[in-house]
Amino acid sequence: MRFRHLAGAALGAGALATGWAFGVEPRLYTLRRITLPLLPPGSWPIRILHLTDLHLLPRQQDKIDWVAAQAALQPDLVVLTGDTLSHRDSVAAAERALGGLLDRPGVFVRGNNDYVAPILKSPHHYWFGSSPRRARTPLPWRELSSMLTGHGWIDLDNATTELDVHGQRVQLAGVDDPYTRRDRYPLIAGQADPDAVLRVGVMHAPEPRVLDAFAADGYELLLAGHTHGGQGRLPFVGALTSNCGLDRSRARGVSRWGVGSTLHVSAGLGHSPYMPLRFCCFPEASLLTITAG
């Protein structure tokens, strides 16, 4: 009798956890506020809204509305680190979601799922880092890029730029998606501008080879997504996977990279439509306030 009660309780707890992970937590959108003291003394603070991995479907009105509401933050700069799309009709949804943020200064890079749509696959392919070899539906990444640049945002795919923020020079460099090896770091290689108050390296997947290159060139803030924070996390264990070459302990949040760089990996706001799961890993955007050290 006692065994049956324990088994029933275990099954009930499992059902509750499953319902939470698939039905509730994926829609608990969260804004993380993080302060990073990286600027020279006397500098004005710089507020960066880091968005990533929206994986938008046109029907996801709650996510569209939540992202659009972040325009009220009035960030100094928006950085979008890829995987905005999940459907061939998602560009209009992305424009609605970004809304008033498109009136702010912004930069972006593309992710692997901006190029091709996700496919149905066994969960073990995600957890263990493999991928089935099947044809995938191309996504309208050119239309996405045209929409963003049409609003004045800068395409940082294998490119660099400088922006004026509160009369201060900020240098940004980015690469196309490292997960699918579209990155071409030699095109942007070279020491970062020593006179800029902040030097930012931008990428979708935080592959160590790319992080090392940015750090060696003097970029002190590195921004990435792709990992979904592990998507499923366990207490005292953390992320079960980073879905790339990054160690699991860095799959979400702030960590040091090399001697002088700070890495921020956002868990992002979405998921594959075929794996609508979040567990102990709320979907998120991050408002980074960069201050004088």
Image (cartoon, rainbow, N blue to C red):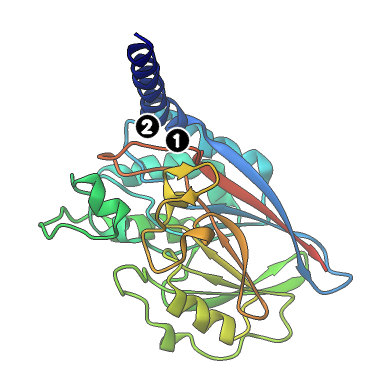
User: Horizontal and vertical percent for residue 221?
Assistant: 63, 70
The residue labelled by disc 2 is 60
The structure residue drawn at horizontal position 43% and vertical position 34%, both measured from the top left corner, is 26
Q: Residues within 10 Å of mark 2 (few under 14, many from 20)?
A: some
- In 3D space, how far apart are the residues under numbered discs 1 and 2 (Cα atoms)? 6 Å
Looking at the picture, which amino acid does disc 1 mark?
Ile
Q: Residues within 10 Å of mark 1 (few under 14, many from 20)?
A: many
The residue labelled by disc 1 is 64
Callout 1: helix, strand or loop? Answer: helix
Q: Nearer the viewer, residue 28 or 86?
A: 28
Looking at the picture, which amino acid does disc 2 mark?
Gln
Callout 2: helix, strand or loop? Answer: loop
In the orientation shown, which residue stands out farthest toward the bottom? 190
Are the residues flagged by discs 1 and 2 in contact, CB closer than 8 Å? Answer: yes
Q: Is residue 100 left or right of residue 232?
A: right
Q: Nearer the viewer, residue 76 or 213?
A: 213
Q: Is residue 149 left or right of residue 273?
A: right
Q: Is residue 35 left or right of residue 210?
A: right
Confirm whether residue 152 shows in the render: no
Quarter of the rendering occupied by the N terminus: top left
Confirm whether residue 260 shows in the render: yes
Q: How many marks?
A: 2
Q: Nearer the viewer, residue 7 or 129?
A: 7
Above or below: residue 201 compared with residue 91: below
The structure residue drawn at horizontal position 23% and vertical position 53%, both measured from the top left corner, is 125
